[in-house]
Image (cartoon, helix red, strand yellow):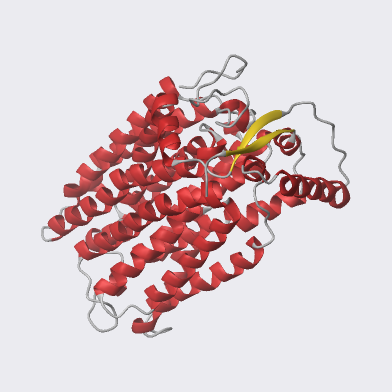
Amino acid sequence: MSAVETGRVTTDIPARLDRLPWARWHWLVVIGLGTVWILDGLEVTIVGSMSAALKPEGPGLGLSNFDVGLAGAMYVAGACVGALFFGQLTDRFGRKKLFLLTLGVYTVATVLTAFSMSPWWYFGARFLTGAGIGGEYAAINSAIDELIPAKYRGRVDVAINGSFWIGAAGGALLTIPLLDPTVIDPAWGWRLAFGLGAILAVGILVVRRNVPESPRWLFIHGRQDEAEEIVRDIERRVREEDGLELTDVSDSITIRQRRSIGMGEIAHTVFTLYPKRTILCFSLFVGQAFLYNAFFFTYGDTLTTFLDVKQTGWFLAIFAASNFIGALSLSPLFDRIGRVKMIAGTYILSGVLLGATGMFLGSVTAVTLTLMGAIIFFFASAGASAAYLTASEVFPMETRAMCIAFFYAIGTAAGGISGPLLFGALIENAADSGDITKIAIGYFIGAALMIAGGIVEIFLGVRAEGQSLESIAQPLTAEDVDDTGRPGPGHSTPAPA
C-alpha cells in the first residue's frame, strides 16, 4: 500500500461520536472488545495457580521454580512481540481485522498449551498465547477509545482494563476443583483450565463480529462513505433503541486522506513531536509492568513455597476481586478529578504501600500478605489501567495502535520479563533456607518504579479528561499540519510535548 495522499475530506464524524449519550450500543463495544482483559487475567492466574500442578513429572511437566518464572517471562515476551507486530498492522489495515485475527491467535495458542507434552512445548505455547494477547492490547485499546464518547472515555478505559481481574478471580476459583485430585485427575486438571480459556475466547469472537470498524480510522484512510454509513447506523440505533435525542454538531476537521502511514513518520511523531509524552508513557508502563508481573506471576509460588499454602485459589480470588473493585470504583474519578491527579496518586500510594510490605515481609502470613496485596492493588489496578488510557489518547490517531504497542512492549520488556525472572530466581534462592525476606528486594524495586512513575506523571501528565482525541493530539493528516508533520499556523490545539 502506498502512503501517498488520496484526497481531502472535511468531516464532523469525531464530533458526532463524542456528543453521543451513553446507550446500549456502547455496551456492545464494551462486551465485544473489553472482555479480552478477562482472558488475559484468566491466563495469568491459571499459570500462577497451576505452578504446583506443573512441577511433578508425569501429571505435570516437571517444572522447577525457575521454570515457572521462565514460563511467565515467555508469555510476556510473546506479548511484547505480538504487540509490536500486530500494532503496526492495526494502524495500517484497520482495527476490526486485527482484533478478530489476534483473538484467533490467542485461541489456537491456548489449545496448544492445553496439549503441552514437554516444558519446551509449554514455553512455546505460552509465547504464542502472549503474542495474541499483546496484539489484542494494541487493536482493542485504539478501537475502544475511538468509539467511546469523550465524556466517558476515561472511566470506560480504566474499568475495562481493570476487568482483567474478573478473569483473574474466575481463574483462581476455577483452579480449586481442577486441582482437587478427588474431583479431577491431576494429569487433566491443568489442561482443562487452559482449554476453558479457549472456549471463552470463541464466545467473545461471536460477539465481536458485530462491532464495526472505527469510523475515525476509515475516514483518514480514504473510506469516508463507509465511515458515514457506520456513524449514521450508530445514531439510528441510539435514537430507536434508547429513545434519545441527538443534538447537532458544528465542529469539523479537514483531513488529508492517506492509505497508510510509514514507520518513519510514526517514529518521528513519538520521539520528535512528543518527547515528553514518550517519557511519560515509558515511565508509567515500566512501573506497572514490573509491579504486576513480578508480584502476581509468582504470588501463588510465594504462598506455596514460604507460607505453607496448599490451595492458592481462594487467596488469589480475594486479591483479584480487590483489583477489579479498585479499578471499577475509582474509574469515574479519572474523568471528574482528572488524569494527572489520579494517576500520580494511585502510582505513588501503591508504591509506598508495596515498599512498606517488603520491610515487614518476614512477619507476614498468607492472610496478611493477601490483605496487604489487596490494599496495594486496589489503588495500583486503577493506575495501571490508566497507563493504557494515557498511551491510547495522547498521540495522533494515525499512530495510536502502534504507540500503544510500542510502550506496552518496551515497558513490559523492561518490567514484565525481568520481573518474573528476578522473582523466580529470588524464590529459587530463598527456598532452600525458607527465608521469605530474601525476595523483599523485588518488592523494593517495584515500589521505586511505581513512585517514580507517579512523580513523572505530576510533571509531564496530560490533562485529557473530557477532550476529544483530535484536540489532545491533532491527526498528522489534518489540513493545518504542514508537510513535515508539524502543526501549521492555523493549529489551535496545545503544542506537542
Height in image: 194 above or below 103?
A: below
Q: Residue at x 23, y 44 (%)?
A: 442
Lateral position of residue 26 relative to residue 485, left or right: right
Residue furthest out toward the top: 489
State whether residue 162 appears in this view: no
State whether residue 114 appears in this view: yes
Height in image: 458 above or below 76?
A: above
Lateral position of residue 143 relative to residue 180, left or right: right
Q: Quadrant of the C terminus?
A: top left
Looking at this view, is 398 or 401 the one in front? 398
Q: Residue at x 57, y 43 (%)?
A: 157
Height in image: 187 above or below 326?
A: below
Q: How many marks?
A: 0
Lateral position of residue 10 relative to residue 45, left or right: right
Q: Residue at x 45, y 33 (%)?
A: 346
Residue 383: where, in percent of width, then height? Answer: 46, 38
Residue 166: where, in percent of width, then height? Answer: 53, 57
Residue 172: where, in percent of width, then height? Answer: 44, 64
Residue 458: where, in percent of width, then height? Answer: 43, 22
Lateral position of residue 185 relative to residue 104, left or right: left
Looking at this view, is 319 or 136 the one in front? 136
Looking at this view, is 46 or 311 the one in front? 46
* The quadrant where residue 459 appears: top left
* The quadrant where residue 62 appears: bottom left
